[in-house]
Amino acid sequence: MKLQPNTNIFRLSWYLDQMRGWSFKTYMLLMLGIGIIIGTTVGAPLNALALITMIAAVMGFTCTLAITNAKPINGILGLLSAIIYIIVSIYAKNYANVVLQASYILLLDLPVLLLPAWSKNAEKHIRGLNISQWFLTLLFFMVVLGLLYFMDTQVFISPRPWIDATAGAIGVTGSILCTLRFREQYYFWTIQGIMSVVLWGVTAFQGDANLTLFITYLLYLSNDLLAFTDKHTHWFH
């Protein structure tokens, strides 16, 4: 596949076009989610970290909705939000989440930005896992979990190694399935969303982050529900 930067990202008309054709429920969830994220941020003590977390949360949430609607705008939104999430995760000592966000950049964002043909008519290339592919997927998950847990306990010391490593391994596995256009990615996104709610809830409780990411991952779960139930999205319909 030819390496070719997507120059459309420098055109305002491309962004307008990317925001068209989403399902009605997705638009409603987008507006609700952005309102909740901004409200949660301004309702708490404001500082530089809180503000950049809010920006990342808005872009990241919009990115997940774009993926659900098979829109390539997820590439630029995911790239920018992942960079900020990496900064926030380092500050919070959630090091497996740093690896997870880096995997999003490599597996989900850069292919969209550098390989336009990869994301063209993505909804027509959706497929399901067979039994052997399920086995390889679970094996991959176990290997990644072991490596991330080792990193969180032996290389960088995380206060929450099991939660951090598990959430990271599930997310890395989901991103691989998304890159390969398997619909089963949403099973992993759903479980990863639950684990991330726990991770950032515990992180906030321990004083290493605010509640914005906790709320944001609750919103991610609502997007996963849409992927399963909204007949106007392509992953399961």
Image (cartoon, helix red, strand yellow):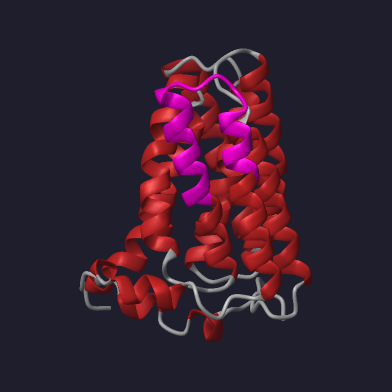
Q: Is residue 233 left or right of residue 110?
A: right
Q: Is residue 71 visible?
A: yes
Q: How many numbered discs sit on the rendered protein?
A: 0
| Residue 48, picture quadrant | top left
- Closer to the camera, 66 or 32? 32
Q: Quadrant of the C terminus?
A: bottom right
Residue 50 highlighted magenta (yes or no) = yes
Query: Which residue occupies the foreground of this view, 73 or 103?
Result: 73
Q: Quadrant of residue 68?
A: bottom right
Quarter holding the N terminus is: bottom left
For residue 21, above or below residue 188: below
Position in image of residue 66 (x %, y %): 53, 66
* The residue positioned farthest toward the right in the image shown: 229
Residue depicted at x 70% and y 59%: 224
The answer to whether 3 appears left or right of 58 in the picture is left
Residue 129, image x and y in percent? 65, 71
Q: Nearer the viewer, residue 236 or 154?
A: 236
Q: Residue at x 68, y 74 (%)?
A: 24
Residue 50 point in image, percent of width and height: 48, 27
Question: What's the magenta bit mostly, secondary-structure-wise?
Answer: helix
User: Where are the magenta residues, as a range?
Assistant: 36-60
Residue 64 within the magenta-colored segment of the rendering = no
Up-down relation of residue 106 to residue 201 (above or below): below
Q: Residue 203 is drawn in which quadrant?
A: top right
Q: At which x and y percent is residue 223?
A: 68, 58
Q: Is residue 82 above or below residue 207?
A: below
Instruction: Evaluate whether residue 89 shows in this view.
Output: no
